[in-house]
Image (tube, coloured by chain):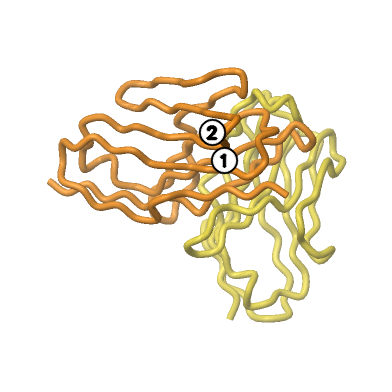
Amino acid sequence: GVTQSPTHLIKTRGQQVTLRCSSQSGHNTVSWYQQALGQGPQFIFQYYRKEENGRGNFPPRFSGLQFPNDSSELNVNALELDDSALYLCASSSSPGTGADTQYFGPGTRLTVL
Amino acid sequence: KQEVTQIPAALSVPEGENLVLNCSFTDSAIYNLQWFRQDPGKGLTSLLLIQSSQREQTSGRLNASLDKSSGRSTLYIAASQPGDSATYLCAVTRGSTLGRLYFGRGTQLTVWP
């Protein structure tokens, strides 16, 4: 399945954070979502073949990487209080047929103080 | 812009009741619709995926219907059990941005014994 690390993280405003995601075996596409408390997940961006393949309404301080083994990182610079959320990654076997079910990891809970 | 709304926001029922959760979306040009389950502080589990050309999907006690022209989907849960307690989210993908999920805020379901 999809795994994410760390499980929980506490940072202070202005710091930088890196979240990690290992995709399901055979999947080459990773998407990242931010879920604030009481809200539905919001799309941050998607990576396919190590390139960003679509981005939601998030500022450039949210950036990502995809590695040759298709795992991925989400980096957030200059953390703000509103960045406190559950960060979810999802993997799928293709970037956009739409027919593929996306498989979600358990998430990383980020708290910014 | 695609907006997804879920009603009700919360639902509390006794065990054994049959339930209907509602989801509506503003842009009928969807590619598919998924229902997810989320347990507190956890990731998402896909329950049912309906292609835009389909009318419904069934899995066990769950049945999801889709009326694309009216922008509505319902998730029917038969003979509810306490283990069904969770937040249920619906999400759609659009033809123009396949692979990106647009989520509602979810319906928080509590089934008491």
- For the point 64% across and 51% down, the residue is A33
Count of marks, rendered view: 2
Give whichever of discs 2 and 1 has the lower sequence position.
2
Marks 2 & 1 on one chain: yes
Q: Mark 2 points at which residue?
A: B34
Return the residue nearer the eye: A52 or B95.
B95
Q: What residue type is labelled 1?
A: Ala
Task: Report the disc number at residue B91.
Answer: 1
Image quadrant where residue A113 sits: bottom right
Residue A35 horizontal/vertical position (percent): 57, 58
* Chain letter corresponding to the colour yellow: A
Q: Which amino acid does label 2 sit on?
A: Gln
Residue B46 horizontal/vertical position (percent): 49, 33
Relative to residue A76, is residue B26 depicted above or below?
Answer: above
Badge 2: few (under 14), some or many (20 or more) residues near its Cα, within 10 Å? many
Residue B66 horizontal/vertical position (percent): 51, 28
Return the residue nearer the eye: B96 or A106.
B96
Relative to residue B113, is residue A19 depicted above or below?
Answer: below
- For the point 84% across and 44% down, the residue is A52
Q: Colour of chain B?
A: orange
